[in-house]
Amino acid sequence: MRATAELSGTGLTASIDRALGCLRHNFRTVRGAAGWYHYLDDPSPGVTASAVGLFCFSVAGVRFERTPDVVAYLLSQQRASDDSTDGGWSVRTTNGFPIAEATSWVVRALSRPGTGVLGGEALARGAEWLRANQNVDFGWGSYLGQPSRVFHTALNMLALQESGAGTDALAGAQRWLIDGQNARTPAWGPTPGAEPTMLHTSVALLALSRIPGALSANTMRQTAEWLLERIEPGIHVERSTTVEEYDVPYADGDVQAVFQNSLPHFAGPLALSAILSTGVVDPLQKKVFDSVNAIMDTQLEGGHWELPRSPMRPSVWALWPFVSALSSARSAILSTPRAKAALLFPGCAIVQSEDVAQDLTRRLLIQNALFDWVRNRKVVLALWLVAAVTTGIPVGLLLAGKFSVKDFLTALIFPVLLMVFQVIWDRRAARAGASG
């Protein structure tokens, strides 16, 4: 049976390695800062991008040699004060005013294995900042008092889950997300009641699926199927969420300033990560295989993917969703990083290690050769079987004293005729093969 789609663990791993190679190539150290800016060609590292860069290595299960330098930089940028801003992290454009968009990513980065013991106290303070800035409706905006949004709430929930903190905060956020689900479909939009999008449904599903009992298996399956229906292999963004834009007012000293935030999103890879991570939908489907292969096929030479509004510049935002999706696919579908999967039909695939593929192929070829030999000689083998039976029975009866010699010789007439017919058949077949 011919495979309808294939997936190579070697290809997946190579694609992930190229993406991480892009981060290694663009790593920057400037005046005590170590890491990346969201545009990777910018020489000055930023907090959020540096945290996202560490997250990429961690989610791929790869050790980054400069992790201690990045962690030290992140710790040096944590806000220390006697007011409500203590423990948070800011972005370059908010001039030291902490926001959830940065703090949640740093908390996620410091929660990953390999960041060392130095981040322990900073991690606890960062998680406390997230808890303290949860709105009274139990959702999150950029900070306390800003309108609650689905992406912020889900991202902060993931950060608190991974840090092992915020049980009470998570319980309230769970209720806020569930209540904010679209009334007509098992999906979410950017705010409660808004038209659902792949992006916001994906992050909500990722956050809720990690809380035991938050969603029933049936609800999670319906949501994952809703996402799978809308995934288009090779189309990584959805028009309505290519960039999520909103104003963030903040205090810059005695001046009230406004920062217009623009979050670029890749809904396709995030949806794939959500589907594969929850495990409620069978990943052995052609659309899943095609989507993973399309991610690898659209990777640019530099190891990143195209950022829609700035296609000529590599960006950390055009790395992490893809690394996450490829890593999820490798874990959900393949037994080892060097395995190979051949999809025969939905729900059925042959998964084999590429390390033993040659030996397995040899055994399969031998088996196929035997099947072919039997199939091409069905008539001949049937005649030999009849001859063996009709000869064996008289011999057995003769040896048992049930047949006389005369009866035995008479019984052999039919097998002899079959053997003569067999010889004639073989010669005719040989002549036909020679003439062809």
Image (spheres, rainbow, N blue to C red):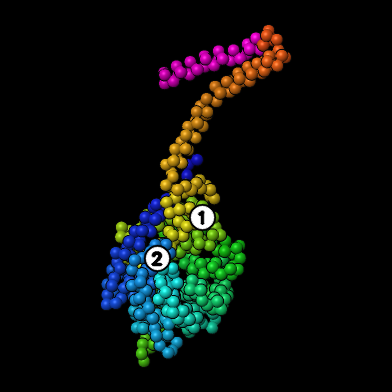
382 and 62: which one is in front? Answer: 62
Q: How packed is label 1: few (under 14 Cα within 10 Å), some, or many (20 or more)?
A: many
Q: Amino acid at mark 2?
A: Cys
Q: Which mark is residue 165?
A: none
Q: Amino acid at mark 1?
A: Pro
Q: Which mark is residue 283?
A: 1
Residue range in magenta is 409-436
199 and 108: which one is in front? Answer: 108
| Image position of 117 with respect to 341: above or below | below
Whether residue 37 is visible here, answered yes or no, is: no
Q: What kind of element bears circle 1?
A: loop
Sequence-first tag of 1 and 2: 2
Nearer the camera: disc 1 or disc 2: 2
In percent of the image, x 37 and y 56: which residue is there? 15
Asked whether 163 falls inside the magenta stretch, the response is no
Q: CA distance from mark 1 to mark 2?
A: 22 Å
Q: How packed is label 2: few (under 14 Cα within 10 Å), some, or many (20 or more)?
A: many
235 and 99: which one is in front? Answer: 99
Q: Which residue is mark 2?
A: 56
Asked whether 415 falls inside the magenta stretch, the response is yes
Give the percent coordinates (x, y) of residue 160.
49, 74
In percent of the image, x 52 and y 14: which residue is there? 424
In this view, which residue lies farthest toward the bottom?
254
